Amino acid sequence: MKKTYVVEPIGVVRSSRNEVKDDHWGSETCAVELLPPFDERSLLGLDGFSHVEVIYLLDQATWDSEGVLRRPRGNPAWPEVGIFAQRAKDRPNRIGISVCRIREVDGIRIELEDLDAVAGTPVVDLKPWVAEFGPKSPTFQPRWMSELMEDYW
Amino acid sequence: MKKTYVVEPIGVVRSSRNEVKDDHWGSETCAVELLPPFDERSLLGLDGFSHVEVIYLLDQATWDSEGVLRRPRGNPAWPEVGIFAQRAKDRPNRIGISVCRIREVDGIRIELEDLDAVAGTPVVDLKPWVAEFGPKSPTFQPRWMSELMEDYW
């Protein structure tokens, strides 16, 4: 039997968006607040970075093995692709990652831009954005993905 | 009591590096192989992307609340920073993320560049790199982090 791992929230998403929707995330007001036992010491120095990666659990998403191969958003204009070739929220382990600009670190709260997760979403890690951990060579992506992203933010 | 979440490996790291070390990851040969029930259908279309984010569990790392505030690598030349202002592997939930160039998708195996995880590390998600999910404004980071990264790859 496969070994499993338990993860525990270290924080929670605060957001002006309470309902799961696909697009127009850019206009929301959003933050992450730490949960006990984590306190402001765990954020010391984060304000020296421009961006942070927020890793969270999409607790309202569901995973069904039928979804292993599907058209993104069910759009017939786009190809059927595997679940690991798309970023759909209904996926194994339901992990979400967003790269957010840091507006302010205030105690146990980080005010952010561009966090595409709804209010109450459990946060399981925060990692400062480090240029050397980004792509180290030119990037490309299929046209369908660029089309999908047109209204996302 | 805080709700917890169970995550299950969807794949495993194959790497020429078997031992945990800090630096010089760039020269290693590395891949991810899917585990059952996942098969090649879940990777369909991934070869249309240049890079993939590999999300894994640092199963040889440990977390101790004493580590909430520490000097990266214990280096006295660098400041004490919170665990969420650094990317040290000994962290809550022990989640690691690498952005890797895709060399080849071959059946259930993805040949990669720049995967900084040792052989056998459990993989819990794969997400294609999408430009619009990267930083959307200019980035900066503290000098200590740039110094730390000098020998990393």
Image: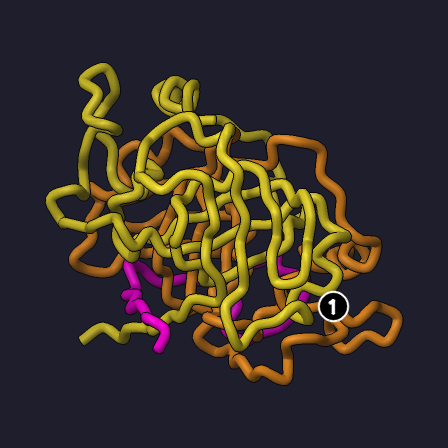
Chain colours: A orange, B yellow
Q: Residue drawn 26% across and 41% down?
A: B83
The C terminus of chain A lies in which quarter of the figure?
bottom right
Q: Residue drawn 61% across and 63% down?
A: B108
Observer-nearest of B8 and B70: B8
Chain where mark 1 sits:
A
Inspect this view and state whether residue A118 appears: no
Specify the segment rendered in magenta. A1-28
Observer-nearest of B53 and A20: B53
The kind of residue on which mark 1 rests is: Val
Where is residue B70? Give x, y as percent: 18, 33
Q: Height in image: A68 above or below A17?
A: below
Where is residue A75? Give x, y as percent: 81, 74
Inspect this view and state whether residue A94 appears: yes
Q: In screen coordinates, is B80 left or right of B44?
A: left
Instruction: Report which residue position mark 1 lands on.
Output: A81
Q: Residue drawn 68% across and 54% down?
A: B105
Q: Main secondary structure of the magenta part?
A: loop
